[in-house]
Image (cartoon, rainbow, N blue to C red):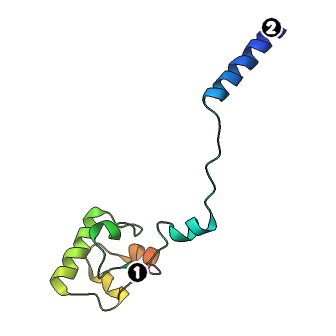
Amino acid sequence: MSHAVALAALLVLSVLVENPIVAPPIASAETARATPTAGTDKVNINTADAKALTSLSGVNRSLAEKIVKYRDEHGAFKKPEDLRRVEGVGNGVWEKNRARISVK
């Protein structure tokens, strides 16, 4: 039986040597500051393209394109709340994102 245990231990070791379990690198404080976490940075709805708008919670590509089209047709948003005028932006989308939306 001890021979089987030794073989099993060798098998486990060979797997670990070929595929070591390595923790991901720890980001330095400088790197962490330089790369904001997605979903926390402000989005200027007057300048953001459709791709940037999709970073807002609940905003898919279709809704992002509606926001851009609305802005092109009606001009710049005067206040963040004006985003609610876009068809498809309901209370849920607004409430989830209100702290991240800016107009400059």
Residue 93, x across and y down, in percent: 39, 73
Residue 66, x across and y down, in percent: 23, 72
Residue at horizontal 32 percent and vertical 75 percent from the top: 89
Residue at horizontal 32 percent and vertical 63 percent from the top: 60
Which disc number belongs to residue 3?
A: 2
Name which residue type carries label 2: His
Which quarter of the rendering shows the N terminus? top right
10 Å crowding of disc 2: few (<14), some (14-19), many (20+): few
Which disc number belongs to residue 101?
A: 1
Along the horizontal axis of the image, is 72 left or right of 23? left
Against 90, residue 81 (above or below) is below
Against 19, residue 70 (above or below) is below
Is residue 1 something that shows in the picture? no
Residue 42, x across and y down, in percent: 43, 78
Which quarter of the rendering shows the C terminus? bottom left
Is residue 44 something that shows in the picture? yes
Farthest-out residue, right: 2
Residue 46, x across and y down, in percent: 29, 82
Residue at horizontal 25 percent and vertical 87 percent from the top: 76
As helix, strand or loop, the secondary structure at mark 2 comes to helix
Farthest-out residue, left: 73
Farthest-out residue, bottom: 78
Camera-side residue: 64 or 9? 9
Which disc number belongs to residue 75?
A: none
Residue at horizontal 63 percent and vertical 67 percent from the top: 29
Labels 2, 1: front one: 2
As helix, strand or loop, the secondary structure at mark 1 comes to strand
Camera-side residue: 33 or 12? 33
Camera-side residue: 52 or 20? 20
Name which residue type carries label 1: Ile
Q: Mark 2 near mark 1, Cβ–Cβ under 8 Å?
A: no
